[in-house]
Image (tube, rainbow, N blue to C red):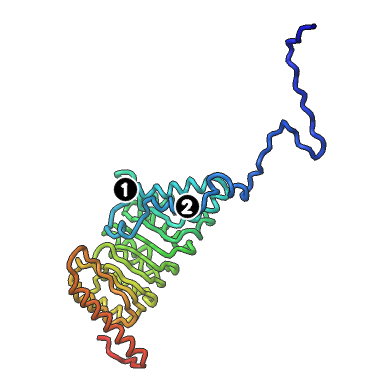
Amino acid sequence: MSPKSNKRVKASILQPKDGAKSCNTPETTNLTPETLGHKGFLALPHELIYMILSHYNEIKIEDIMINPTSLPARFLHRFKALRSLSQLCRLSRKIYLPSLYERLQICITTTPTWYKEHGNGLIRKCNGLLESQHLWPYVRTITVCFTRFEMHRVLPSFIQLLKALPNVQTLEIPHVHALMTSTFKKYFEGNIFPTIQKVVLPTCAHWILRSCPGIRDVTCNEGDGGVLISAVVSAGGRNLEALSAIVAGPVHMRQLVKADPPLKRVRVDVGMKDPENLIRSFSKFPTLRVIEIDTDNRDVDHLVKIASDTLRACAEYSLLKSKGFKNVSRS
């Protein structure tokens, strides 16, 4: 019996016939947007992903109302998660890119020189978005802080971007340097932002409000906000439906009554100066239906009674007006 040969036998690779697959050729999946949507991470329901994202810190009105010079870095976590999701593939980009840019936040700092970080961030992000027109329709809310750093460069870029965005409706300003009123007048006067419907801003930023003729909801997060009433009236004030944290004196209230906006809701802080008379002053608006009182854990039963009487007076005036008593006194 002859000994076995030590030479290795070369495996022959058979060429497949026409229309046949080789048994040695691994089968690969054709990766398309359709197949990607049914495999791996993207196969998870969108509702589940957004529920997970809801556990990230998101900027709320309470964070803006304290008038902070900047917001902490924890508000970047959701942005970073959405950015990572949008970079997985074309399909994930299509799904998550709108959520990524729905809120443009230029109010978060991670260094001690927050005033420089705000200014440089505004210049960088505004110029970047101005060159990315495909992102413009996604932006619905802008949350931004203003300092005096490089204002001659910051404000022109910001105004140009604000005028370019077609769907932005909400402008939130946690902080503005108190000495910037004249600077705001210089750059904002004469500009119009017709899509803005809701603003949260300090009193010293009232020149922005004068450029928003379609404003519906105004909240003041610093100062008494009386000048904001004048700004709303000067912009037209025909769409105003909600006021929050604004102490309007007799002069400003007369201006607002004369403008006759369809005011439906007001929010009063119990810590405001003379909240009793403030609530009573709203009895001259026939469309008013809701008065919210921020109690701050105080006893506000007397304010609730005044608010009830005020709403009753509003309803009575509305009834008289509907019956044709157009000249009924509103004093």
| Coordinates of residue 228 in the picture (x, y in percent) | 30, 70
Question: Circle 1 sits in a helix, a strand or a loop, which is it?
Answer: helix
Residue, disc 1: 114
Pick the residue in front: 118 or 99.
99
Residue drawn at (54%, 56%) of the image = 134
**Residue 215, placed above or below residue 133:** below
**Residue 9, placed above or below residue 293:** above
Three-letter code, disc 2:
Leu
Question: Circle 2 sits in a helix, a strand or a loop, which is it?
Answer: helix
Circle nearer the viewer, 2 or 1: 2
| Disc number placed over residue 81 in the picture, else none | none
| Coordinates of residue 79 in the picture (x, y in percent) | 43, 49
Mark closest to the chain's N terminus, 2 or 1: 2
Three-letter code, disc 1:
Trp
Q: Quadrant of the N terminus?
A: top right
Residue, disc 2: 48
In the rendered view, does 302 fall on the left or right side of 47?
left
| Coordinates of residue 85 in the picture (x, y in percent) | 49, 47
